[in-house]
Amino acid sequence: MHPLRASGILLHPTCFPSHYGIGDLGTGAYRFIDFLQESNQQYWQVLPLGPTGYGNSPYMSYSAMAGNPLLISPEKLRDEGLLEEEDFANLPAFPTGKVDYQLAVAAKIPLLKKACANFKSHATPEQQHAFANFCQTKAYWLDDYALFMALKDAQASPSWHTWEPEIAKRHDKAMEAARLLLAGAIFYHKFTQYEFFRQWSELKQYANERGIYIIGDIPIYVAHDSADVWAHPDIFCLDQQTGEVELMAGVPPDYFSATGQLWGNPVYNWETLQKQDFSWWIQRFEAMLDYVDIIRIDHFRGFESYWAVPKGEETAINGEWVKAPGEQLFETIKQKLGKLPVLAEDLGTITPEVEALRDKFEFPGMKILQFAFGSDSANPYLPFNYQRNAVVYTGTHDNDTTVGWFNQASDWEKQNLLLYLGCFSPDGIHWDLIRLALSAIANLAILPLQDVLGLGTEARMNFPSKAEGNWEWRYEAQALTQESAWKLKTLTTLYGRAPQPKS
């Protein structure tokens, strides 16, 4: 982690303004990086970047290592000579302020397929070489992912465990036949990954050159219907005959839900992973460090003990805590990759054992200001209880916006906040909490863009217990004003989080 005080903004790329119904890695992304630089920010935190399935959750991806093709910028494909201006002539009228995933898919996938066809027939020798090199260096996950997605297209997208047994269980002859039959679709899925990572690498370079570091997000679990589980069923708790999930991941009843959260992902078969020297996890960290600077580990406590819910349960109530070999895992990763630039999402039911695991590897934990004012002075989220090796947030993607949270807070909680602050500023409660975050002793402060913009509940990114209607918020281009950049820059500088002058 960065040893000095700094701050940044939490924003997923789907939230960028664009002409294609969903934020992408084009003009809107570069303007956002410029806004970060103008406001003295040094970090950009994103959610997981993988291809999403039903519900559009970035935490339920078809691959732990692939990128989301919907984030590819058609404008950059045009600039590369793979699309023409006339290809954009009949785009639908997309809604502003939100993502319409169904409409975005209908509009963007034909553009990606046309760009792929043009690449296949007209790529320059340099482009062909770059593509071949990408496919070779990423083959350890790309080959399985491209075949998996091609099979899903051919199977009308049912989960892999319902496919023909020879394919579901990856028999050699059936796999080779599928590769021959689906060669065109496999090429397309490899092409979209090549383009995603090419565009992402250019954007990351643009950010890094301006002193902006990217914090990625690695979910502890992967989706059952994913290339990872299909390709590595032995490292997950599955019925090895049917492929169904035997033990489901989730969390017990908590702040967000009285019945807990039942995620449905398979938990890991840690005994098998240990025998394999955690090779899959090492590859996963290596893959992520190819395209981010720092990794936020989601649900870190699951590496110490995880909540396992038996198959057939409809809520997470009837689960149990099971010990995980987190210390051995992180020791192995450290030996293989060196000291990791990691921050730990240590929210929820946290035990002394979880804290000990986090502290042993010097991973900073998370502090959420919206959690700070509902109890007494022992509350660990109150700023005077922080340590330097921590990351303070006004709220996360799972929280309401600060304005929305304050509007729905109890009178008692509002009074506690008022007593703590001394008074409310005329600029709005969101700037009060931004000021509080930036002034805290924690080395790093991260602010959701919605809070910088002073938006209400309508801009909330996710309701954790709600299956649909999440991950849709987008901002419009004119939202990033000079006034907001100036306010944020002023406070960032005041509290010692501005970039240090280069000697």
Image (tube, grey):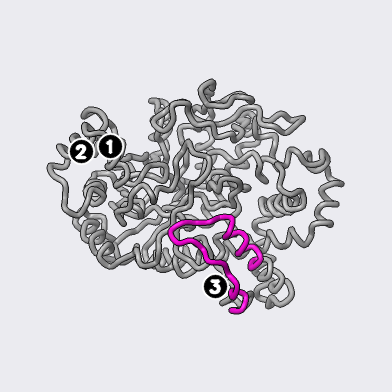
* Dot label at residue 417: 2
Residue 446: % across, % down:
34, 50
Give the distance between the C-alpha atoms of the residues marked 3 and 2, in whole angstroms: 46 Å
Circle 3: element type: helix
Residue 32: % across, % down:
39, 64
Residue 59: % across, % down:
53, 44
The three-letter amino acid code for the residue at tag 3 is Glu
First reached walking from the N terminus: tag 3 or tag 1: 3
Circle 1: element type: loop
Query: Which of the pair 333/10 is nearer the observer?
Result: 10
- In the figure, residue 80 lies in which quadrant? bottom right
Q: Relative to 259, is 407 on the left or the right?
A: left
* Dot label at residue 409: 1
Range covered by the magenta-colored residues:
85-112
Whether the residues at callouts 2 and 1 have beta carbons within 8 Å, the answer is yes
- In the figure, residue 161 lies in which quadrant? top right
Near mark 3 (Cα within 10 A), the count class, few <14, some 14-19 or many ≥20, is: many
- In the figure, residue 497 lies in which quadrant? bottom left
At x 22%, y 59%, the residue is 493
